Amino acid sequence: MSQAPGFTYGAAAPEGGALISKSPKGAGKGRRTPLGQRVARILVLLLVLGYLILPLFAMLEFSTRGDFDRTTKTFGRTLDSFAAIFSNDDLMTSIVTSLEIAVLTVFGMLVLLVPTMVWTVVRVPRMRRVVEFLCLLPLAIPAIVIVVGIAPIYRWMGQNLGGFGASALTLAFIDVILVLPYSYRAIDSSLRSIDTATLSDAARSLGAGWPRTIFSVIVPNIRGGILSASVLAIALVLGEYTISSLLSFNTVQVVIYLLGKRNPYVSVAVSLAALVFAFVLLFVISRFAPGADNRAQRAEEEPA
Amino acid sequence: MTGSVTTPSSSPVAGPAPSGTGARRMARAGNYLALLPFHGYVGLFLILPTLIVAVGAFTTAGGSLTLDNVSSVFTSSVFVDAFVKSIQLAVITAIAGAVFGGLLAWAVARGNPNGLLRQFVIAASGVLAQFGGVMLAFAFLATFGFSGLVTVFIKNQLGVVLDMSWLYTLTGLAVVYTYFQIPLMLIVFLPSLDGMRQEWYDASASLGGGSWAFWRYVGGPILAPSFLGALLLLFTNAFSAYATAAALISQGCPIITLEIGCQMQSEIVLGQENVGKALALGMIVIVSAVMAVYALIQRRASRWAQ
């Protein structure tokens, strides 16, 4: 069969394992747990989660500091740092830039990936492994390496493609590459959960052309995967620093970093807001991607 | 499912095909041509940059062949040092992340599979592990920095001024890296723990095995490949990280990713224009080797996840 051997979602996935395929086989797990285990579990949760939460809490404390009261040795509380986000022109410009890059990246990623992946399933299954390999390749090539190799290409674009070639929006080109592994896994798990081949055969036999088959039949069936892929792409673009800083584009992370030298309170406030924003996005898709559990489970139960 | 792919006889490109193998061959070629945009794009923005790095590592700025760049990677104590420190940092934080992240994954896996805690931890881990970068450096500055929460609290309440300069050194880097390795471990390792079947516990118990026997003879061996694979993934993750280090360390370029960044930004010394590419190639070699081992382990790990 054409399914890649030795490739399952249950095992350690390069990325987005639990993010994408959350299929707990929890049947009967709640049965009488020994007391020792329950205590150990709570201890682990307290300690490890505590370590994860402390810096986030510190960001909240730090960014809401007001005047220091010498007698009580405590800080007043104010939201000034958060309000300052909106009055800082550099910051607002960079946020808009990053959001524009995010939109372009999501668009580019979907246009590039969805038809290609559907095509490999229905027409050229032999190429599936090749496409998978290329999509996961960015995991083996660190961003810092990509930026070394792509700097000459961006220099060329800046000189030859006019205003657009020199704008920060060109970062979308490389961000599409960076999100490939995440997006591929998200869309792939959706594609595996539906019978893509039969669906497209049915659509084709009813007279639909390929564009119509893909956009009116397949795409609505893999909405969950497309949504996850898009959210992961947005989160990645908003957090991207390595490439934009070394190519000297002022994305939001670059400006947060520069601002941190002058006004760390505002920088911490923006960072916290961005992390919370990304968290809410991921949390919402994990709650509202309908039937994500069943799908992943079905995909796993499929004989390889 | 993918095995059930059928190939309708009509060509997607040429419309209803006349009989004959020529048309069919055309159609098949058309099938592959449809993948051209994807391959072209990846070729231009991923493969070409990689080739520029690989070729540049062996050429001078003028374009003639040379081994000077690559040999300087091995002879310059600065570069060797940067590689060694990067590897140390990656090994230490991968192990710490794998242990604590593994424990956290276990604690989460034991809980309600549809519970709020689980979804909360997974979503938060996704953010912290993959999209933190610069922001995590600021989180630690707000915690342990000179006017961070912990520092200020201890100063005001206990009257002790702690020396927090460690935060801006490799030690601090290790602490912050561990912070994003733990959630990555959770994301990568949780599916393997979810794959553990109740039947296996029961089978072990019915043969008289206790908790220790189960983990020693059943759970441990089953999870070992996944755990090792995750460990390697954490290694490459820390080894490749740039943003957090760049935001935290402002003096010098102690690790290899920072060194490459410094090479890109600094004044170019005549004759050393392509040294950065040789360093980048070195990173590719190390990461590829680790990922190759990962792929082998992965094949073993998936055996039990059917």
Image: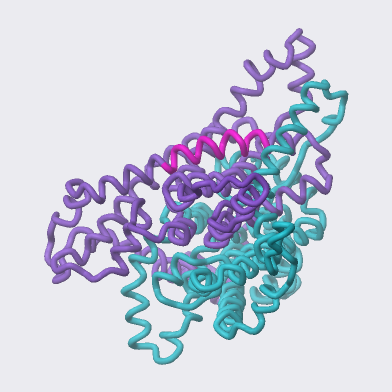
Measured from the top left, where is residue A237 in percent x and y? Answer: 56, 69
**Residue placed most toward the observer, B105 or B141:** B141
Residue at 72 percent of width and 16 percent of height: B211
Q: Which residues are magenta?
A: B89-104
> Is residue A96 highlighted in magenta?
no
In this view of the protein, can residue A13 be seen by the observer?
no
The colour chain B appears in is: purple
Residue at 14 percent of width and 69 percent of height: B270
In this view of the protein, can residue A284 be seen by the observer?
yes
**Residue placed most toward the observer, A241 or A170:** A241
Residue at 80 percent of width and 35 percent of height: A26
Residue at 27 percent of width and 59 percent of height: B54
Dividing the picture into quarters, in which one does residue B250 lie? bottom left
Dividing the picture into quarters, in which one does residue B44 lie? bottom left
**Residue placed most toward the observer, A141 or B134:** B134
Q: Residue furthest top?
A: B208
Measured from the top left, where is residue B210 in percent x and y? Answer: 74, 12
The colour chain A appears in is: cyan
Measured from the top left, where is residue B235 in percent x and y? Answer: 46, 42
Q: Is residue B151 left or right of residue A77?
A: left
